[in-house]
Image (tube, helix red, strand yellow):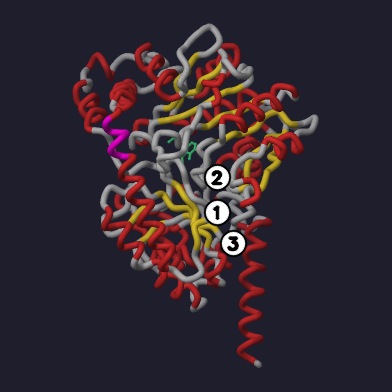
């Protein structure tokens, strides 16, 4: 093993024993004997941790020492890297939230178990995020981020054999997550014809007697599209008639990137349509740049929240960290922060569009309307999103290509988190994207990408390998002529 492989192993502990010399998946004897099937389902899922391509996988391909990047095991990247990767807001946090944390670093706050949520925060979450006051038929439970909301909801409502309707592409965890409860996914491809969001008729056509849940991510990660009021009502009615629980993830709803767009939390439509079969979630990582607090909310009918509370008690206990709650409450009340950070998202999206206009073969998949994520479509460049991911990393830009989010855009989409405070970072991207594409077109990263997917060994990985190899064969054929 050479030095860079060794340091990769040390620097990226979350790769478990996997390095670039490991053959096949990491299923050694100990794992085979003691790993539960629900965990194995994740190991074998293309969107399970470590199986999809990210900028991190560019590190060994480029021969960079990972210790230089993830100093002391931190995920925060050094300043000369621009992080367009994972979805934490870089436009904050609000000073009000930091002050709330400082004001509450006391023995009384940190020593005792905190409640699931302080009443003031429970009320604020209901009203500010879900646009519906708490009542006998609607309440809010705490969770460790919106991701906690996802995990508990999947565990509380799914059983082996159930099917979950999701979109393709979607937030990466919607595909492997249901597997922990033994359920499978049925993905609706997003494309221009459905406006890159859920079409009620398509939802209806997908429902069968195994369908238990629809994941309605609105605003949608990765496109930032939103559902209309009419679509939401139609989807709620269809799912009610068929006993399908709707899981409405609204965690990207804070920033109205498009001034003409309207986002409606489905729970708030309770006077127009039955919403008792809707469980909603959101967090504070996107809206308020407080990802590290790990605070989130699950909302819905108390009869459904009961199952989630029972599970939470057994898994992580029913207490949400108090400093995080103080920060969350201050943030939810800070409307001025939301206004200012929304301006940042709008400005940045403008620069992303300039970057796309300057890069040959690159387009915006669809105009984002809320939040701060978008996908660029690189299908016109002739190379895969994974190869461009490596080329971008070489220039200091960290992105996640489409195989993390589904099959549809596996090699053509690159997802961008465009929430950076400093416009110079986006301008640098604007002035580098075209060069990165040209660099990838030289073909130097193809072997590294193929090697990665060979080791991952999933069906999607195999399709990506075939796509690259057939391009290489065509290129050789043309050169020979
Ligand atoms: C749709 C969606 N849900 C949940 C999460 C996780 O959020 P949190 O940090 O609040 O757990 C993300 C993060 O990217 C997301 O995009």
Q: Residue at (75%, 34%) from the top-left corner? A: 207
Mark found first going from the N terminus, 2 or 3: 2
Callout 2 touching callout 1 (CB < 8 Å): yes
Q: Can I make out residue 68 in this image?
A: no
- Circle 3 SS class: helix
> Percent x, y for residue 454?
61, 63
- Circle 2 SS class: helix
Residue marked by disc 2: 172
Q: Is residue 133 above or below residue 296?
A: above
User: Which-is-in-front pick, marks 2 and 3?
Assistant: 2
Residue 52's disc number: 1
Residue marked by disc 3: 453
Write down the region rendered in magenta: 336-341
Q: Is residue 130 left or right of residue 42?
A: left
> Percent x, y for residue 313?
50, 18
Near mark 2 (Cα within 10 A), the count class, few <14, some 14-19 or many ≥20, is: many
């Amino acid at each position: 093993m050479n030095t860079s492989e060794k340091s990769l192993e040390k620097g990226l502990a979350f790769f478990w024993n996997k390095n670039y010399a490991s053959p096949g998946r990491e299923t050694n004897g100990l794992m085979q004997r003691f790993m539960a099937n629900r965990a194995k389902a994740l190991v074998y899922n293309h969107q399970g941790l470590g199986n999809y391509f990210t900028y991190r996988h560019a590190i060994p391909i480029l021969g960079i020492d990972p210790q230089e990047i993830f100093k002391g095991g931190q995920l925060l990247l050094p300043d000369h890297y621009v992080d367009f990767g994972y979805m934490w807001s870089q436009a904050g946090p609000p000073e009000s939230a930091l002050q709330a944390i400082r004001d509450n670093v006391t023995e009384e706050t940190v020593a005792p178990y905190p409640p699931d949520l302080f009443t003031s925060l429970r009320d604020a979450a209901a009203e500010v995020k879900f646009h519906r006051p708490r009542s006998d038929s609607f309440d809010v439970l705490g969770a460790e981020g919106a991701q906690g909301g996802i995990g508990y909801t999947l565990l509380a409502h799914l059983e082996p054999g159930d099917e979950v309707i999701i979109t393709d592409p979607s937030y990466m965890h919607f595909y492997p997550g249901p597997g922990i409860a033994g359920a499978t996914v049925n993905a609706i491809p997003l494309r221009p014809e459905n406006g890159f969001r859920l079409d009620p008729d398509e939802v209806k056509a997908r429902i069968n007697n195994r369908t238990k849940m629809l994941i309605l991510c609105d605003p949608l990660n990765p496109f930032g599209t939103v559902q209309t009021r009419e679509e939401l009502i139609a989807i709620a009615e269809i799912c009610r008639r068929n006993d399908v629980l709707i899981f409405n993830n609204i965690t990207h709803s804070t920033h109205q990137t498009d001034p003409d767009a309207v986002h409606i939390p489905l729970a708030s439509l309770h006077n127009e349509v039955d919403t008792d079969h809707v469980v909603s979630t959101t967090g504070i990582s996107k809206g308020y740049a407080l990802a590290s607090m790990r605070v989130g909310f699950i909302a819905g009918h108390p009869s459904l929240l009961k199952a989630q509370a029972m599970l939470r008690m057994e898994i992580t206990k029913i207490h949400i960290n108090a400093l995080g709650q103080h920060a969350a409450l201050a943030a939810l009340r800070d409307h001025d922060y939301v206004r200012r950070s929304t301006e940042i998202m709008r400005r940045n999206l403008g620069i992303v569009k300039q970057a796309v206009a300057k890069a040959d073969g690159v387009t915006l998949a669809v105009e984002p309307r809320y939040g701060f994520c978008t996908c660029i479509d690189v299908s016109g460049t002739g190379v895969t999103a994974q190869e461009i991911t490596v080329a971008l990393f070489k220039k200091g830009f960290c992105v996640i290509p489409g195989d993390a989010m589904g099959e549809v855009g596996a090699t053509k989409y690159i997802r961008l988190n465009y929430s950076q405070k400093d416009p110079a970072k986006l301008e640098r991207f604007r002035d580098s994207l075209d060069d990165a594409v040209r660099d990838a077109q030289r073909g130097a990263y193809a072997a590294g990408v193929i090697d990665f997917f060979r080791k991952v060994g999933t069906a999607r990985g195999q399709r990506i390998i075939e796509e690259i190899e057939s391009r290489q064969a065509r290129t050789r054929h043309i050169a020979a002529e």
